[in-house]
Image (spheres, helix red, strand yellow):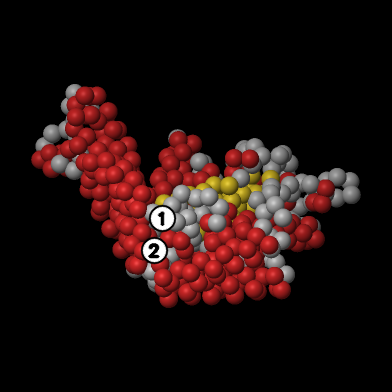
């Protein structure tokens, strides 16, 4: 039952992630070593972080979270359901963590995956907070107790925009660390435990370095904005479909490489990117309108293909909107209720994690059968009636309920996908009309753009140089 429930929670996490973000890029998770793993991840977005990690991994790790969360009404029940383990931080007054540590080691002995956020708390910075020693101590104790084949895996989670709905996210796995490797063994080959302070410090430093390589780690927000703009412009110089987005994973990797350049190389790129961004705002044009060039033919093709898709899929998309409207509004309101960006994501996930499955279950149970409640709810899913009648003969029975339950999230995602196709047509029209209306102002912009691309290409950070 526990395993089946974990798979269900992981599936819900993946659906929520796909609903919150229009693009989810996963890098390196497929190549991780098998066996017990201790995931160490950056913590930039509250409860969103464990949800996107669980969704990306396709499994539910045993997450470790600060014990103070158990004081929030309603949260303890959710924590117990998804198997979260509490840890008492010294910043919160401390406490006895021996039972939690024993539980973690036991999970690792069974080949499970455990996840911890070694920064200790969530935040809105563009850089990592100091990494605490808890993850290193756990890993060393597990290795000392005989957990075989265990690796510490740094995982970086990068959000394009923590506040906006339907933004983008990338989950990148770093180089696995062996806590039983030569650097963490005694002279006689015995694994060192957490009592060995030098080993704890060394492993903590290695975890910090692994996280810095996989996660955002800019000194300031301005540094991040400048380097990301330069990387986005340079990568867009390569062949892309009109209005296509540059891969977030590639943009982040190049932006970090640019940020690590020597000052005499980095600062001119930052200045050129900032000036180019300032001119784009003044002319009221987007860089993706300029490269690759968007033409009338692109607009016509997208208008025709999107019109056909809307004609074919609109009835099912309407069902997706109808059955998911109430939980979606609850998620939006939950985000508006918070002021800090990191709290907005937490509120949305907590509400969505409960509201969406509860709605799907309620509809799948009460939408079928007979009675005025079923008849009223059946209006929301009426486009599914032919399929239900063909497969099951009537709306009674578990088969019809299961079909409705599966259709609720699937049609909701279909509605979002179709809406974004319509928005893309509008964006194409905006690009064509803006380029025509602003063509007299594009000369200086294109010249500056070309210089910026050339500077990035010439930098030692450019891949392959």
Do the CB atoms of the residues marked 2 and 1 lie less than 8 Å apart? Answer: yes
Decide if residue 445 is on the left or right side of residue 148.
left
Decide if residue 126 is on the left or right side of residue 183.
left
Q: Residue 294: which numbered mark, if any?
A: 1
Q: Position of residue 211 (x, y in %)?
A: 65, 58
Closer-to-camera residue (393/38) = 393
Judging by the rendered image, the residue that carries numbered circle 2 is 435
Determine whether the residue tagged by mark 2 lies in a helix, strand or loop. helix
Residue 269 drawn above or below residue 410: below
Q: Residues within 10 Å of mark 1 (few under 14, many from 20)?
A: many
Determine whether the residue tagged by mark 1 lies in a helix, strand or loop. loop
Closer-to-camera residue (348/214) = 214
Q: Please name the residue shown 48% across and 75% down the image.
A: 278
Q: Please name the residue shown 43% across and 72% down the image.
A: 441
Q: Earlier in the sequence, mark 2 or mark 1?
A: 1
Q: In the figure, residue 71 lies in which quadrant?
A: bottom left
């Amino acid at each position: 039952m526990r395993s089946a429930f974990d798979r269900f929670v992981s599936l819900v996490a993946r659906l929520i992630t796909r609903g919150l973000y229009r693009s989810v890029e996963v890098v390196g998770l497929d190549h991780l070593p098998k066996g017990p793993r201790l995931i160490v991840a950056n913590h930039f977005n509250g409860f969103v972080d464990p949800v996107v990690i669980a969704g990306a991994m396709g499994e539910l790790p045993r997450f470790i979270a600060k014990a103070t969360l158990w004081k929030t009404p309603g949260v303890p029940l959710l924590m117990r359901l998804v198997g979260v383990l509490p840890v008492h931080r010294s910043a919160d007054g401390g406490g006895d963590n021996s039972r939690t540590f024993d539980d973690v080691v036991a999970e690792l002995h069974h080949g499970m995956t455990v996840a911890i956020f070694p920064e200790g708390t969530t935040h809105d910075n563009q850089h990592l907070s100091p990494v605490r020693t808890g993850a290193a101590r756990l890993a060393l104790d597990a290795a000392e107790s005989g957990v075989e084949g265990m690796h510490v895996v740094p995982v970086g989670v990068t959000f394009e925009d923590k506040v906006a709905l339907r933004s983008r996210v990338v989950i990148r796995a770093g180089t696995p660390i062996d806590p039983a490797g030569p650097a963490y063994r005694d002279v006689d080959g015995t694994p060192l435990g957490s009592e060995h302070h030098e080993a704890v410090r060394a492993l903590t430093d290695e975890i910090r370095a692994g996280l810095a390589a996989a996660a955002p780690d800019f000194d300031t927000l301005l540094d991040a904005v400048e380097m990301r703009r330069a990387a986005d412009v340079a990568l867009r110089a390569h062949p892309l479909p009109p209005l296509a987005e540059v891969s977030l994973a590639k943009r982040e990797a190049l932006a970090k490489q640019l940020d690590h350049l020597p000052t005499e190389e980095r600062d001119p790129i930052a200045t050129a990117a900032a000036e180019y961004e300032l001119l784009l705002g003044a002319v009221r044009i987007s860089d993706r309108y300029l490269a690759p060039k968007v033409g009338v033919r692109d607009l016509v093709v997208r208008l025709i293909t999107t019109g056909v898709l809307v004609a074919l899929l609109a009835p099912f998309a309407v069902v997706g909107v109808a059955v998911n409207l109430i939980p979606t509004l609850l998620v939006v309101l939950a985000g508006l209720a918070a002021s800090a960006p990191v709290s907005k994501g937490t509120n949305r996930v907590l509400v969505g994690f409960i509201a969406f499955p509860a709605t799907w279950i309620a509809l799948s149970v009460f939408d079928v059968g007979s009675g005025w409640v079923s008849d009223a709810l059946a209006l929301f899913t009426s486009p599914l009636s032919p399929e239900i009648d063909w497969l099951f003969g009537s709306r009674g029975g578990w088969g019809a309920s299961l079909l409705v339950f599966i259709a609720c999230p699937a049609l909701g995602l279909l509605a979002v996908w179709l809406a974004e196709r319509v928005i893309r047509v509008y964006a194409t029209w905006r690009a064509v009309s803006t380029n025509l209306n602003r063509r007299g102002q594009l000369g200086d912009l294109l010249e500056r753009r070309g210089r910026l691309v050339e500077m990035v290409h010439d930098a030692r950070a450019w891949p392959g140089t």
